[in-house]
Amino acid sequence: MAANAAMVAARRRSRASESAGRRALRRFVRHRAALAGMLVLGFITLAAVLGPIIYGRDPDVTDLAKGYHAPDAFFLLGADSLGRDLLARLLVAGRVSLSVGLAAAVCATGVGLFVGLLAGTFGGWVDSILMRLADIVYALPLLLAVAVVSGIVGPGLFIIILVIGLFQWPEAARVVRSVVLSLREQDFVLAARALGSTNGRIMRKHLFFHAVAPLTVTGTFTVAIALLTEAGLSFLGIGVQPPQASWGNMLADAQQVFILRQYPWYWIPPGLAIFVTVLAVNLVGDGLRDALDPHE
């Protein structure tokens, strides 16, 4: 009888989640700013992935005679101090910056999901220890922490992704923990416990998928934070290292005052790329938050 009740409850949850998913999709589609952000983000991603192939220029080829060349029919965005094509570098840099943002967000949300599930499901001393650890990590200045670790271990793309992910998980953990705490006393979880399910099975089968939806919102905002962090680190010279291009180290090349004043094509494109990408990601995150809001 308990097994039948659990099966009925599972079917009701499935129908409810399917209906909730359709409602969330409709709300997201009606969010014009989020749709605009999605389109812009899609265009930037396509430009980063396919742009270097279509444009066909080597971003690392130098020609000192063309240093600081203004935009024209050949150099569409001009050339840098070494005569390298800035458009070719901007497109390749997009791959690096977007990869760092996405990979760091996946790392942070993955760690946060695991920690939040453990804290919410087990509670007690496990919850207390994990949440105090989250408080400690959350209190650390992200840019300073990544800068210190990168300075000790050495700069590198993998190190940047790993450190940003490991210092950005507390927000995701708190979101998942709050979802689990609200669900673990629900009838379907209690029925699963009555049938002999272990905490691990309950986390995998009953709580995991409920935590994924709100976690997507946190993950989206984490992408924006990771993009800005990578740009800041590269600007300081401890992020992505030349000759590999990123939007951050392209800005770092334009720190001199005479470049800011006389060669605006040098720094405006990468700065604009960072601004537009972060804005688009935040708009998508706002749309997802509104669409997944259960009170709407």
Image (cartoon, grey):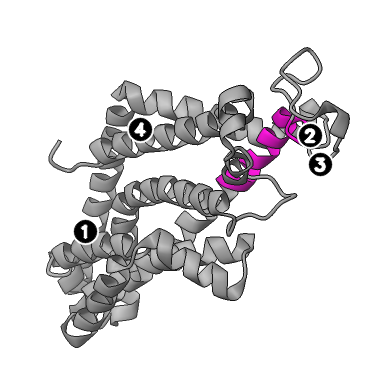
Graded by Cα atoms within 10 Å as few (under 14), some (14 to 19) or many (20 or more), the crowding at tag 2 reads many
Q: Amino acid at mark 4?
A: Leu
Residues at discs 3 and 2 in contact (Cβ within 8 Å): yes
Q: Given this view, does label 4 or label 3 mark the residue nearer the observer?
A: 3
Image position, residue 263 (x, y; %) = 63, 25
Q: Residue at x 61, y 23 (%)?
A: 262
Q: Circle 1 sits in a helix, a strand or a loop, which is it?
A: helix
Which residue is labeled 1 in the image? 8
Residue 60 marker = 3
Determine whether 250 is above or below 87 in the image: below
Q: Residue at x 31, y 40 (%)?
A: 21
Which residue is labeled 2 in the image? 84
Q: CA distance from mark 2 to mark 1?
A: 65 Å
- As drawn, the residue found furthest toward the top would be 73
Q: Residue at x 58, y 66 (%)?
A: 159
Q: Amino acid at mark 1?
A: Val
Q: Given this view, does label 1 or label 3 mark the residue nearer the observer?
A: 3
Magenta stretch: give its range: 80-98
Our reading of the magenta stretch's main secondary structure is: helix
Tell me the quadrant of the picture where the N terminus can be found. Answer: bottom left
